[in-house]
Image (spheres, rainbow, N blue to C red):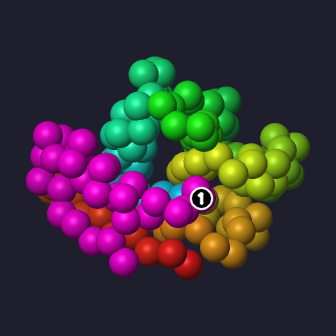
Amino acid sequence: MFSIQINSLDDLPKVAEEFLETFSDQRLFAFYGKMGAGKTTFIKALCRAMGSTDNITSPSFALVNEYDTNRPEKIYHFDFYRLKDMTEAMDLGFDDYVDSGNYCFMEWPEKIERLLPEKLVEVHIEEISATVRELKASIV
């Protein structure tokens, strides 16, 4: 279990490093939180901690963005918010991404709950105030 309070954006680089170290053997991450909770912001910090210099944005309309890192693995960043049904995720080749061995950061995974693999890291981000977030993560 990983649990931390993030008091400002300045804390993100350190928290991202700790998070990646805690889950160093994991590649699949499901991010839960209300709109504006900071899912994309934290994913951006994770990508930066992994050496990505790509433009990290929410793939709201594309459903998935791919980022390079300074590691052998790539990062696939999903945003299922606008997904109409799970068929869209299947047509996208979701299983291939999950089975690739690359990092998969998934926003709004509740939209594809039945497609999620059994072993992944559930990340819950809760807005405590305008600048403070609570992040809890565990392998499920």
- The quadrant holding residue 43 is top left
Give the side of residue 102 with respect to residue 16, left or right.
right
Left or right relative to 49: residue 90? right
Seen in the image, is 106 located left or right of residue 132? Answer: right
* Closer-to-camera residue (120/80): 120
Q: Looking at the image, which residue is at 21% across and 48% down?
A: 14
Q: Identify which residue, 126 or 9, lies in the foreground.
A: 9
Q: Quadrant of the N terminus?
A: bottom left
Q: Is 23 one of the magenta-colored residues? A: yes
Range drawn in magenta: 1-28
- Tag 1 secondary structure: strand
Residue 47 x %, y % = 43, 37
**Magenta segment: does it hold 107?**
no
Determine which residue is flagged by label 1: 28
Q: Nearer the viewer, residue 72 or 61?
A: 72
Q: Residue 62, image x and y in percent?
A: 67, 30
Examine the rendering and report whether any part of residue 122 can be seen.
Answer: yes
Residue displayed at 40% across by 69% down: 137
Q: Is residue 81 above or below residue 26?
A: above
Q: Amino acid at mark 1?
A: Leu
Residue 85 seen in this snapshot: no
